[in-house]
Image (tube, grey):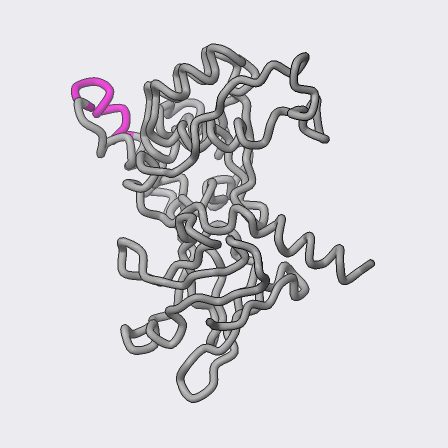
């Protein structure tokens, strides 16, 4: 029974493991299928066993779309306004709301639309929107708040700066945003990112490859280089999560600093990989 439960947890918890690296360009090219409406009265078998919770596929799609696809967000949220508050765990507790996605991408248009439909803004959203008074008041009332990172490990300063990278940010909006960035920089600790030990190109090759943990079509991991030429790990054909080196042959996925991904290495080649969260959850053998 315990073994079966562990296998189930290993498969389900890692089902979305490979969805994110830190490349901002991938969000507009994700491979989520469009969700079609289902007449539940005619097709009772289509009801989720967790209903009346929101359908997890729709939740995942709206949070994914909120990074870049405004038209799809409008379509989903206009039909189901409660999706404006949708929250998704991308893996190991790297939790993100639809509004959080728009915030760390600098998408003011998507953020304001979601807020109009009831999304709950936080300090990261206020930073992206240039709300100096709100950000400063929150930090002064709770010193140290600026050191807490948002989804995927993005820092508070990142949320403020990303807006300036968008087109047509000028005039008064630009001045407000730059003033907020200057304030956050003056704190000295609003941009503490997760650290990763140096790893050479030769060392990277030690881990690159496919690892299987079952016979299913998606029961394998692939370690490869992402667009930033750093290691990432994905389940099946999904996008990869960035791997941050924390010790010899040991990594943490971006956005989940307490998780450990450990490789068994012999003669310079990784033979297997084990995910600890915090105990060993799943082990995959190199193909």
Image location of residue 98, percent across then percent down: 47, 28
Image location of residue 287, percent across then percent down: 46, 71
Image location of residue 246, percent across then percent down: 47, 68
Image location of residue 169, percent across then percent down: 20, 24
Q: Is residue 97 visible?
A: yes
Compared across the picture, whether 70 is left or right of 233 comes to: left
Q: Is residue 130 visible?
A: no
Quarter of the image for residue 164 reads top left
Residue sitting at the far bottom? 267
Above or below for 95 versus 202? above
Name the residue located 31 percent from the left edge and 34 percent from the top edge: 28
| Viewer-closest of 160 and 90 | 90
The magenta stretch is 169-179
The quadrant of the image that shows the N terminus is bottom right
| Viewer-closest of 162 and 61 | 61
Name the residue located 75 percent from the left edge and 58 percent from the top edge: 4
């Amino acid at each position: 029974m315990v073994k079966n439960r562990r296998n189930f947890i290993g498969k389900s918890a890692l089902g979305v493991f490979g969805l994110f690296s830190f490349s901002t360009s991938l969000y507009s090219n994700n491979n989520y299928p469009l969700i079609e409406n289902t007449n539940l009265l005619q097709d009772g078998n289509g009801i989720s066993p967790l209903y009346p919770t929101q359908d997890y596929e729709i939740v995942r799609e709206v949070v994914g779309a909120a990074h870049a696809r405004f038209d799809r967000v409008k379509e989903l949220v206009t039909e189901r306004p409660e999706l404006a508050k949708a929250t998704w765990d991308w893996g190991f507790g790297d939790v993100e709301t639809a509004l959080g996605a728009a915030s760390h991408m600098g998408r003011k248009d998507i953020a304001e639309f979601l807020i109009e439909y009831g999304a709950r803004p936080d300090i990261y959203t206020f930073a992206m929107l240039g709300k100096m008074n709100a950000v400063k008041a929150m930090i002064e009332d709770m010193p140290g708040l600026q050191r807490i990172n948002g989804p995927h490990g993005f820092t508070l300063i990142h949320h403020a700066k990303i807006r300036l990278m968008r087109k047509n940010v000028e005039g008064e909006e630009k001045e407000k945003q730059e003033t907020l960035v200057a304030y956050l920089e003056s704190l000295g600790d609003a941009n503490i990112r997760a650290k990763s030990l140096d790893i050479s190109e030769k060392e990277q090759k030690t881990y690159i490859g496919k690892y299987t943990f079952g016979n299913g079509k998606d029961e394998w991991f692939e370690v490869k280089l992402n667009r930033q030429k750093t290691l990432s790990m994905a389940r099946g054909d999904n996008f990869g999560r960035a791997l941050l080196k924390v010790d010899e042959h040991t990594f943490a996925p971006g956005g989940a600093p307490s998780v450990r991904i450990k490789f068994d290495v012999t003669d310079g080649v990784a033979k297997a990989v084990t995910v600890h969260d915090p105990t060993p959850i799943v082990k995959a053998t190199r193909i």
